[in-house]
Amino acid sequence: MVPRPRNKANKSLPQNLYFDARRSTYRYRRPTDGKWFQFGADRIKAIDAAKQLNLEFTRGADLIGAVMGHATESFAGFLDTYERDVLPPRELAKGTLNLYAVHFRRFRKHFEGKAVDQITIRMIAEMLDALTPRTANQCRALLIDVFNHAAAKGLCPDNPAASTINRIEKKQRKRHTVEGLKAIREKAPAWLQNAIDLALITAQRRTDILDMRFDGVREGFLYLVQKKTAKASDAAWIRFRVTPELQAVISRCRDDTASPYLVHRKPDRLKQKQAQTKDHWTKIEERYLTRAFKDAREAANCYAEWKEAEMPGFHEVRALSLHLYKKAGKDGQKIAGHASEGMTKNYQRGHEEIVWSEAIPDLNISEITG
């Protein structure tokens, strides 16, 4: 016999849990004998308790369902569906997909053997509590999206991840000082010096610095499409005027190694796997740049009094650049590719013309480069 559809007040609640509008409280109806139990006014506690009770009362139902031909879907199986059907149309960046893959492995391990509708708020909260605030918030956001799609397919009555709370992230990393970055640059190899200089001049992220190409320099401009914000903002499509300051850095990037990329290096030993995955054998991977910058920072010993968690990395060169632009009385918004609130998408399928945001990278970085 098919149960009656739930009314509007109870539609988002687990089975057997009901909202009493007169008292603004929740109550649970025991499915074995119909006896009622008051659960109080706390919605999250009531939902969590109801789900755990439902799980107890239906223990073994997954085996029965398998025999009857209507087994509930496993969470691991639905994650496979989510990765196959939901993510590809979004055309996410490779770095984002790699991060998701790490989180998916964590989810599969923590919820191993669970059906989608067996996962409770408490189960998710316990997993998130064991993580750092930043990682916990990333996992929470991803789980909310996963359960939204599961609920839309009728695989669970509500979204348990949405009932958890975001953690407060306290930024620990400090900003670079001019003296500190100068000391790091002096200990860096030539290719890393070029990367630092480009980050100072253009205020771009690590991935965009490493994607800058010599053939992107044409008609007096260096053209760049920011990977992170290309789908969200006009400001992601930037052409930098080749000022004397920028030209000096570009000229330093040219050496005796033939490469299409401004920041490049000749690897000590070329691995076959790297040759297959890279666009060009001289292209530098993001993780390699991060490690090389850390090595140079440790060699410079410029922030000796700071804790490890406070140490600024290559990404913080961007923050120093914007600070120096502001200090020099220049507008860093266009340089960084920060969109104003009123800006809309620039490039979508079917558009033949791209409107480039023009920036003038004219910061004097001689105080750092010498």
Image (cartoon, rainbow, N blue to C red):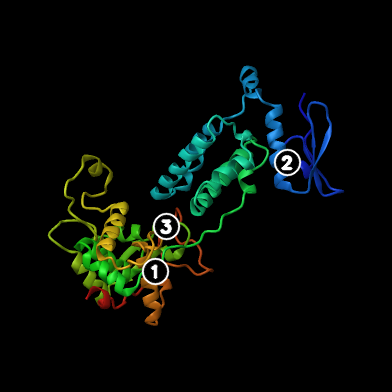
At 52% across and 59% down in the image, what residue appears?
Answer: 169
Upstream in sequence: badge 2 or badge 3:
2
Marks 3 and 1: CB-CB under 8 Å? no
Upstream in sequence: badge 2 or badge 1:
2
What residue is shown with label 2?
13
Marks 2 and 1: CB-CB under 8 Å? no
Mark 2 or mark 3: which is in front?
Answer: 2
At 43% across and 72% down in the image, what residue appears?
Answer: 333
Rendering coords of residue 133 (x, y %): 51, 54
Question: Outermost residue toward the bottom?
Answer: 329
Q: Quadrant of residue 275?
A: top left
Callout 2 secondary element: loop
What amino acid is labelled 2 in the image? Leu
What residue is shown with label 1?
175
Which quarter of the rendered picture does the N terminus lie within? top right
Mark sitting on residue 108? none
Looking at the image, residue 191 lies above or below residue 75: below
Rendering coords of residue 286 (x, y %): 32, 54
285 left or right, relative to 236: left
Rendering coords of residue 268 (x, y %): 16, 49
What residue is shown with label 3?
228
Which quarter of the rendered picture does the C terminus lie within? bottom left
Q: 115 or 332: nearer the eye? A: 115
27 left or right, relative to 351: right
At 43% across and 43% down in the image, what residue appears?
Answer: 102
